[in-house]
Image (tube, rainbow, N blue to C red):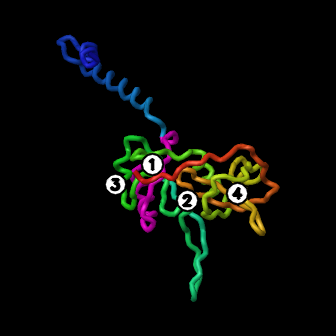
Amino acid sequence: MAELAQNTLGRGKKGIMGPSVERGANSELEMVHSATLPRPDQLPWYALRIQSRLATVASLTLRDRGFEEFLPLYRSRRRWSDRSKELDLPLFPGYLFCRFGAGDRLPIVTTPGVIGIVGFGGTPVPIDPSEIAAIHRVLQSGIAAEPWKYIASGRRVRVEHGALAGLEGIFIEMKKDHRLLLSVTLLQRSVAVEIDESCVVPLKSAVKQASPCQPC
C-alpha cells in the first residue's frame, strides 16, 4: 500500500512521475534519511580485540576508512643491557576503541589486525562513553598514566581540583604516593594516574561489576 500511495502521489499528466516531482520526492527522502542518522559524535564506542603487533595498522586503517578510532598510548622507558629507550605502548594491550553504527560491522571486522568486536553472545556491547571520555581527559592533561590491574570495588572518589577535576574513580594508597584508577568496566582493565590526596573527595556510590566480554 505504501508503494502504491507513493506512485499515485507522484504521477504527472501522462500517469508518469514528472522530473520535478521525482526530484522533490527524492529530496524529501534524503532529508528524512539524514535527519534519522546519528551524528558521528553520537555513535557508540566499541572495543575491538586486535593483534597487538598490528595495533597501529588497525588504527590508521580505520581512520582512513572514515571511522573515529582511539588507541590510548603511554610513554614507558625500557632498559636493555647496553641501552635504554622510551617507547609509546598501548594503555589497553590487545584492544582498540572505535565509534561506528550497527550497520558498519563488516568494514570493521575486515580491518587488518582486528580479531573481533567485544560483546556477549555474538552481539557487540558498547563501552560506557563516560569511561572513554575519562581516558581522553587523562591523555589530554599530559599526566603520566600506566596500565593497572582491574579493581571492581574500593574507595570511590571524585577529583575536585586540578587538570582532572570532575573525574571519578577508585583511590588507592601506595607506599609513597596515591593513585586514581579509571576503568573500562566491559574489558575489566584499568589505568592509573598519580594524584594528590588533597585533590579528591570521597563518594558513597558503589562500583558496578560486569563480566568480561569476548570478541564477537
Q: Amino acid at mark 3?
A: Thr
Q: Residue at x 44, y 29 (%)?
A: 35
Q: Is residue 119 left or right of residue 181?
A: left
- Residue behind mark 2: 72
Q: Amino acid at mark 1?
A: Gly
- Residue behind mark 1: 119
Look at the numbered discs 2 and 1 and tell me whether their residues touch, using CB distance below 8 Å. no
**What kind of element bears circle 4?**
strand
Taking depth in this image into account, of 160 and 147 the one nearest to the observer is 147
- Residue behind mark 4: 180
Binning the other alpha carbons within 10 Å of mark 1 as few (below 14), some (14 to 19) or many (20 upward) gives: many
Q: Amino acid at mark 2?
A: Pro
**What kind of element bears circle 2?**
loop
Q: Could you say where residue 2 lies in the image, as x and y percent from the top left?
A: 29, 18
Q: Earlier in the sequence, mark 4 or mark 3?
A: 3
Task: Determine the image quadrant of residue 206.
Answer: top right
Residue 68 seen in the figure: no
Q: Is residue 177 above or below residue 97?
A: below
Q: Earlier in the sequence, mark 1 or mark 4?
A: 1
Spatial CA distance of label 2 from label 1 is 20 Å
**What kind of element bears circle 1?**
strand
Residue extent of the magenta highlight: 40-68
Q: Is residue 210 above or below residue 148?
A: above
Binning the other alpha carbons within 10 Å of mark 4 as few (below 14), some (14 to 19) or many (20 upward) gives: many
